[in-house]
Image: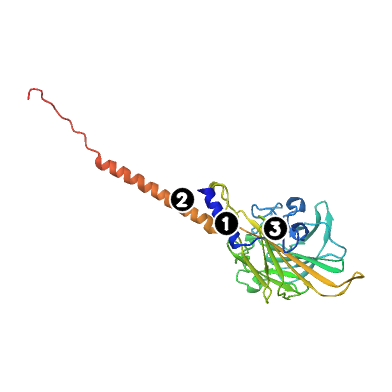
Amino acid sequence: MKHFMLLVCSVIALALFPLRTSMAGHDAGEVLYLSEQPPSDHGNAHGRQGKRGNEQGHGEHRASAERTWYLNLHDLHPGAEAVVLRPDGKRAKGLLSHGKDGWSFVVDTKPLDGSLDGFFNLYVIDRNVSEGTLIVRAPKANMVNHSCGWGHKFKFDEERFRTKYDEAMPLEIVAENLWDRNFHSKTMSGDRLQVNVLRNGRPAPKAQVSFRMGSGWTKTVEADNDGKAAVQLIRDYYPETWSLFDARKFSTVLVTASIEEQQKGLYEGRAYARTRLIATLPWRYVPQRAEYTSYAFGLGIASLFAVASGGGIYAFRARRKKAFQEVDFDERA
């Protein structure tokens, strides 16, 4: 029965999500994206599925003075730059460096006094001319800088919770409603993930947008005239037994947007006739609460039924129980 239900769920998922094996025309290994895991840990995939946080022990309930972010590929070109948009709206330069774990840059989150409580936007911009085409890669990541020890003084600060974007970015993916009022991520499987694709801060209509799950399932859609695109996150976490179910286990999704333009120019002395822009945004999501609350509810009903059945059997046997009576038998009678 268990295998039959899994088969049914798989068929329904495939029917609802026409998936592809490539990412909007790109091989997964060619798309540039940011991660807090070095490339040796995630290879050509966009992060492993596992516990919240990461190898460095960072999480949404615990802040640190600096955070290191890595690029999955080693082929950055001269002139590549990193940019940090801080929660207070200030823009800062990031320093890219190359080491044994590839390209990385460190994000300074000081001072740790709660003034930078909120969301950082992290960007890398890489440009190169190849076969007459200017290729601009713009990976982005959203980072939460938060400690519950700071309290939640920005809980009702609309400006602090407003999703920020950088008008200087050639192409950017902006996702909304990723966090709750306590700066904790709230995305779950089954949710509808909507993004806005922006070209220098303005909507990029008709952009090709790919949503690739950590399981490898991908759906590609076209952004509407307002640059919006959306997909419902599939439920792809099915442990072998319910005893292994982990409500905090996260799955990953990598959003990739690309546009091509007939735009001529020169870059670093090299002429190009076309421009191709590729932006990425990784995110994560946990199992839908209904996945485990329904199980707990069913377990509670089963337990209640077992107790009620046991009580009924006990009462039935108690009613049929007769008191002991001693009988004297007189053989002379």
Which element carries disc 2, helix, strand or loop?
helix
Residue 50 percent across, percent down from the top left? 65, 52
Q: Which mark is residue 299?
A: 2
* CB under 8 Å between discs 2 and 1: no
Residue kind at label 1, given as amino acid type:
Val
Can residue 103 be seen from the camera position used here? yes
- Nearer the viewer's eye, disc 2 or disc 1? 1
Query: Which residue is outermost to the top?
Result: 332
Query: If the image is split into quadrants, where does the C terminus sit?
Result: top left
Judge whether residue 164 can be spotted in this image. no
Type of amino acid at the residue the image marks with label 2? Leu
Measured in 3D between alpha carbons, the distance from the residue under mark 2 to the one under mark 1, in whole angstroms, is 27 Å
Q: Residue at x 54, y 54 (%)?
A: 8
Separation of residues labelled 2 and 3 (CA atoms): 38 Å
**245 sits left or right of 56 in the view:** left
Residue 208 is situated, as x and y percent measured from the top left of the image, at 71, 69
Name the secondary structure under disc 1.
helix
User: What residue would you read off at disc 3?
Assistant: 21
The residue to which callout 1 is attached is 11
Q: Total of numbered circles in the picture? A: 3
